[in-house]
Amino acid sequence: SQKIEQNSEALNIQEGKTATLTCNYTNYSPAYLQWYRQDPGRGPVFLLLIRENEKEKRKERLKVTFDTTLKQSLFHITASQPADSATYLCALDLGNTGNQFYFGTGTSLTVIP
Amino acid sequence: DTGVSQNPRHKITKRGQNVTFRCDPISEHNRLYWYRQTLGQGPEFLTYFQNEAQLEKSRLLSDRFSAERPKGSFSTLEIQRTEQGDSAMYLCASSLSGGNRGGYTFGSGTRLTVV
């Protein structure tokens, strides 16, 4: 069956450093991979989408990579700020259905001032 | 546009009771999704609509769960004969067709507690 794994432990980093979160998957060949941010008690907020034929995508301080050979995506936040503290979720779709997404369990990030 | 709206925000119910949640998507979005999320887990797909048609339903969704989207606008999710295992955050999201290219817009969810 399909499986999506994200950093199993919470990630604590110092303000100003780069945070790197991982998303690994098995038994998938997703056409798209997305990253979301979720704050406590709120719904996820869409951040970035990357297609299977794209190696890297950037948006402001965010960068996502997608390695379909390794079946892995990396999510980077550069120059991290305390306001970046949240849970980050990766989500994959099969690309050939009607938009059914599978989410990972998320990684909790805390940026320490 | 005020985004995706879900009501109520919180619901506490006794085991065995029926509950109904409502979702108002972004008006121009034709796709609507329901997800369920428990503490420490990612959202789990339940079902999705394109306009008023329910096109997919997860095997996780027991017969006690039913969703509707009359007229392709708002949607309701009903849980009959609630069980303690139904306690979770129920999230609604919407998108345009091909929305996997741009991501979903989620509501803030309805937190259900079954006592």
Image: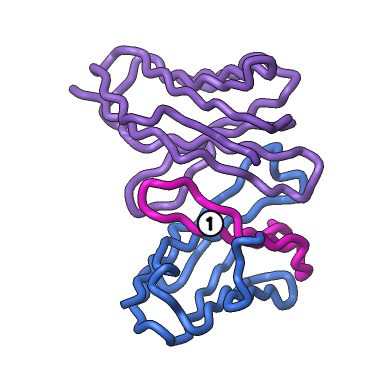
From the top left corner, tell me how far across and down residue A75 is, in percent: 49, 22
Nearest the eye: A45 or A105: A105
Seen from this angle, which residue lies furthest left? A113
Left or right of residue B85: residue A72: right
**Chain A representation colour:** purple
**Chain B representation colour:** blue
Nearest the eye: B60 or A99: B60
Number of residues whose C-alpha sits closer than 10 Å to that of mark 1, classed few (under 14), some (14–19) or many (20 or more)? some
- Which quarter shows the N terminus of chain B? bottom right
The answer to whether residue A36 is above or below residue A68 is: below
Find disc 1 in the rendering and name its residue: B3
What element does badge 1 sit on? loop
Magenta segment range? B29-58
Seen from this angle, which residue lies furthest right? A96
Look at 63% across and 21% down and name the residue there: A71
Left or right of residue B17: residue B65: right
Residue B98 shows in this picture: yes
